[in-house]
Image (spheres, rainbow, N blue to C red):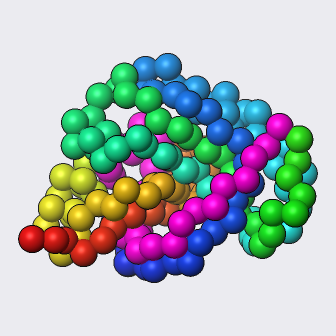
Amino acid sequence: MFLRTESISHKKLIGKHVRTNMIENKIPQLWASFMPRRNEIQNRMDDNFISMQLVDSLDYFRNFSPSTFFEKWACAEVNDLATIPNEMESFLLPAGMYAVFLHKGTASDAPKTFGYIFGTWLPQSEFELDHRPHFEVIGSKYNNNSPDSEEEVWIPIKPKTN
């Protein structure tokens, strides 16, 4: 599951977002509204998509509740923000260090992956969670609801402080 740690410079993103929680789960509707318009985004860096989460505080992960709201983005990385399609917005993902994991399987398998990340890998690592956006890179190996589907999970980290 764990692939690597990677420090990135900021990323310019264009897409759509919604405020939701795991009970209301507006994520399928977000992607359904984004994907038909994905080709309107100019100057894309690659063919990948970014599925990004912004939480209000790190308590979201420490005291997880399906009723806690977060912001979810469906977007793509671009090399400039000069042209933003109607009804889409830009986001500047801050630079920083990430732990990168491979999730293989369906969305219903995701709790196992995230359980490993937050319950095993992170506590045993030399890192702690940083308060920056989390995201998944959805590339050519992604196949919605297939057990063979693959995506990278990027978790923001920083060295542990004692």
Per the rendered image, the range of residues in magenta is: 87-114
Quarter of the image containing the C terminus? bottom left
Please say if 48 is above or below 118.
Answer: below
- Identify the residue at image location x=66%, y=46%: 74
Horizontally, residue 7 falls left or right of residue 30, namely left
Q: Position of residue 31 (x, y in %)?
A: 68, 38
Q: Is residue 95 magenta?
A: yes
Q: Is residue 22 magenta?
A: no
- Identify the residue at image location x=45%, y=80%: 7
- Identify the residue at image location x=81%, y=63%: 81
Q: Position of residue 103 (x, y in %)?
A: 43, 57
In which quadrant of the rendered view does residue 130 lie? bottom left
Quarter of the image containing the N terminus? bottom left
In which quadrant of the rendered view does residue 76 lie? bottom right
Q: Residue 44, can we see it?
A: no
Q: Position of residue 43 (x, y in %)?
A: 85, 68
Instruction: Name the foreground residue: 8 vs 148.
Output: 8
Instruction: Name the foreground residue: 122 vs 11.
Output: 11
Q: Residue 99, can we see it?
A: yes
- Identify the residue at image location x=33%, y=67%: 157
Residue furthest out toward the left: 162
The count of marks equals: 0
Please say if 122 is above or below 25.
Answer: below
Q: Position of residue 87 (x, y in %)?
A: 83, 37
Residue furthest out toward the top: 24
Horizontally, residue 118 falls left or right of residue 2, namely left
